Image (tube, grey):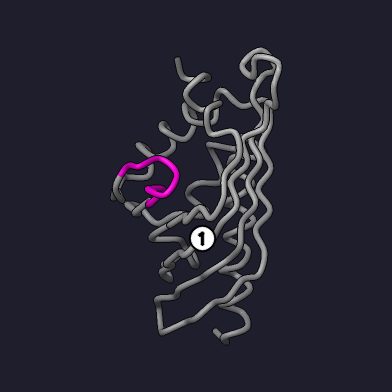
Amino acid sequence: MTFEADRAEIIELFGRYADIADTKNFDQLPPLVHADPFTMDFESVTGMPPLETPLPDYVAALRGSFEPFVATYHSITGHVVTVNGDHATARAHVRAEHWFPDEAAGGGSNRWLVVGFYDNEAVRTGHGWRFSKVKLTAAYQENTHLLAEATT
């Protein structure tokens, strides 16, 4: 493989990753995106420390996490990929918008916005590149109170 082919495949992982939530494709896409197991690090948003998880457990949690949303939209841009043999790092900017039902907003905005960066790690597998670690670092958020209201 060439660097350009590896880079293109890793960037495509970001698109598939966004599609998991945005199209609610929790069955076919996760194995095309993630190694099993893999590490998720959303501490900057959830406060939970990084966690290595088997793929089926992650998919179950993902379904539950995205259930409250009417829609989501993840725009992931500015990819910077470094390949070192069968391992890679990939940094990208993210703007993630999540809409709750209007009744959850209590007359205010129903959109939870997160902007920041993904600093992911990928491994080459027998089936192509897969993310072995997904780390989100939020730089800014709006309407975080909606999360608590929607889960109570």
Q: Which residue is mark 1?
A: 118
Question: In the depicted view, which residue is nearer to us: 9 or 108?
Answer: 108
Question: In the depicted view, which residue is nearer to us: 93 or 105?
Answer: 105
Vertical position of residue 142 compared to residue 152: above or below: below
The percent coordinates of residue 39 (x first, y second) are 34, 54
Question: In the depicted view, which residue is nearer to us: 36 or 139?
Answer: 139
Vertical position of residue 89 compared to residue 43: above or below: below
Based on the picture, tell me whether residue 46 belongs to the magenta stretch.
yes
The image quadrant where one finds the N terminus is: bottom right
33 horizontally vs 37: left or right: right
The percent coordinates of residue 135 (x first, y second) are 43, 57
Q: Secondary structure at mark 1?
A: strand
Q: Quadrant of residue 34?
A: bottom left
Question: In the depicted view, which residue is nearer to us: 121 or 77?
Answer: 77
The percent coordinates of residue 142 (x first, y second) are 60, 39
Vertical position of residue 93 compared to residue 107: above or below: below
Tell me the residue at 58%/76% (across/down).
80
Judged from this view, the residue extending furthest toward the bottom is 2
77 horizontally vs 116: left or right: right
106 horizontally vs 29: left or right: right
Based on the picture, tell me whether residue 113 belongs to the magenta stretch.
no
Give the number of marks: 1
Q: Residues within 10 Å of mark 1 (few under 14, many from 20)?
A: many
The image quadrant where one finds the C terminus is: top left
Tell me the residue at 69%/42% (across/down).
73
Q: Which residues are magenta?
A: 41-48
Amino acid type, mark 1: Tyr
Tell me the residue at 42%/84% (across/down).
84
Tell me the residue at 56%/50% (across/down).
140
The percent coordinates of residue 65 (x first, y second) are 48, 30
